[in-house]
Image (spheres, coloured by chain):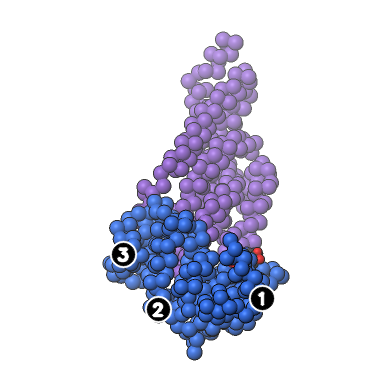
Amino acid sequence: MIDHMSALFTLGNMQFLLRGAGMTLLLTMIGCTAGLFGGFLLAYARGSKGTLTAPLRWGATAFVEIFRRIPFLVTLFLVLYTAQMIVPRAPLFWVAVVSICLLCSAYMAEIVRSGMESVPAPQIEAAEVMNFSRWRITWMIVLPQAWKVILPSAVSYMVMFVKDTALASQAGVFELMFAGKALANRGLDPFLVFATVLFAYFVISWPLARFGRWLEAQLARRTHEGDRR
Amino acid sequence: MAHLDISGLEVRYGTVPVLSGIDLAVERGELVGLVGPSGSGKSTLLRALVGLVPPAAGRVVLEGKDVDYASKASLRGLRDHAAIVFQQYNLFQNMSVLDNITVTPVKVRGRPKAEAEAEARALLARVGLAGKERAYPDQLSGGQQQRVAIARALALKPALILLDEVTAALDPELVRDVLDVIKDLAGEGITMLLVSHEMGFIREAAHRVVMMDAGRVVEVGPPSQIFDAPTEERTRAFMSKIIRH
Ligand SMILES: Nc1ncnc2c1ncn2[C@@H]1O[C@H](COP(=O)(O)OP(=O)(O)O)[C@@H](O)[C@H]1O
Ligand SMILES: [Mg+2]
């Protein structure tokens, strides 16, 4: 046991795992940030009215429904093979980034939408009758109120999503899980390796979860600061 | 010519008719009370007038202009002249009282900010809320919020104001303040349609009263007729039920 431990816990191996963990964190951050923007655009498109924008509405709805329903692994391979058709030797990191953005946008679209729906309808109708455009209503009335609902949900989604990034290793993308598998394949004790990987996932997601809860409490408490135009 | 002329107005939710041919002409500066049992279509009528629910049929003429609810330009023109105040949740919660009142004049109509703010302050004083400019809606009582909502509507200088049970969600002691503000407005040339269960107030302030039931206008007349000597059985039944409560 001691031998196994000293074989695993070398500076090189730890740096290797740390790089994997950094990649996991990076993929999560990219996915969730891009997802918030993508999700907003999707939610905005879905909420459009009128016949002219109908294709946009359907497209956005289809996008959200599809990418929320198919397993992430399928999305990943879909992007991988599509990318390889277009660019042979497409860099795996970018394949992972694109897949993650697709998935996160679809999920965030629902989070953003339910946040926007939390704003009481009469406020929006009042603005409509005062000749606000839809963009102005969203920008000046809905988002300044909805972000307090959206952000905590987005962070809890992010916490869940940290785990999903592990699937990227299946397509050969280097991240924490991939680093773990690589070490185990080198003959290091798999139990110890994956226990360390587990610990690393916990270290990433637990503070994030705490942050989410703290944020929610903060936002519920303060209502006005920072609202002034 | 009447200021607001509604003829044959129909509204359906899906296939269910909610308004079945409303005819009503309102003179400029008239305060018309709208009464009737819950579900009779009073709110729907007001919402249809400002284009929040699309009419299925009928004609609305405001200030001599036919309103085409399918046309954005026509709707925009209508909404430049008409304002509506709901039962509650009117105010933008993320904006101060002053911003609530000035946002449309400044951002939508492009008026100078200083001018709009001076007017907003005067309007606030008028509804008894001088000094509340910097407050946020959730720091005000329900009655104060409704008075801000009315001030905000007035800042648009509307020719027509629609008020839908604006005191219904208020504690009894706050109702009077709001009604006083409405009464002040009557006779200033602003045409008002007022849906309310405050029968005493309608009797004292309205020029005419419209009794609605099941999506139709049952009876129209001066308050003395509707409250004391209704000609229609349904009005009589409604009034006796209200008064017994
Ligand atoms: N969004 C809606 N969808 C379907 N039916 C509705 C909707 N809003 C109102 N109704 C129906 O329309 C009728 C009239 O409602 P409303 O205009 O609110 O009446 P009132 O204001 O006189 O109480 C009621 O039967 C109500 O159930
Ligand atoms: Mg109603």
Are the residues under marks 3 and 2 on the same chain? yes
Q: Colour of chain B?
A: blue
Residue at (66, 76) in percent of width and height: B233
Which residue is labeled 1 in the image? B233
Determine if residue A133 is in view.
no
Q: Which numbered tag is attached to residue B125?
A: 3
- Give residue A54's position: percent from left, percent from top: 62, 66
- Chain to which mark 1 belongs: B
- What's the residue at 58%, 61% (across, down)? B245
Q: Give B91 or B109, whichever is nearer the viewer.
A: B91
Q: Position of residue A84 (x, y in %)?
A: 63, 48
Instruction: Decide: is A173 above or below B139.
Output: above
Residue shown at the point (51%, 82%) measured from the top left: B26
SS label for mark 2: loop
Single out the mark in the foreground, 3 or 1. 1
Q: Which chain is purple?
A: A
Circle 2: residue type: Gly
Q: Residues within 10 Å of mark 3 (few under 14, many from 20)?
A: some
Host chain of mark 2? B
Which marked residue is nearer to the observer: mark 3 or mark 2? 2
Is any atom of residue A71 visible in this view?
A: yes
User: What residue is shown with label 2?
Assistant: B187
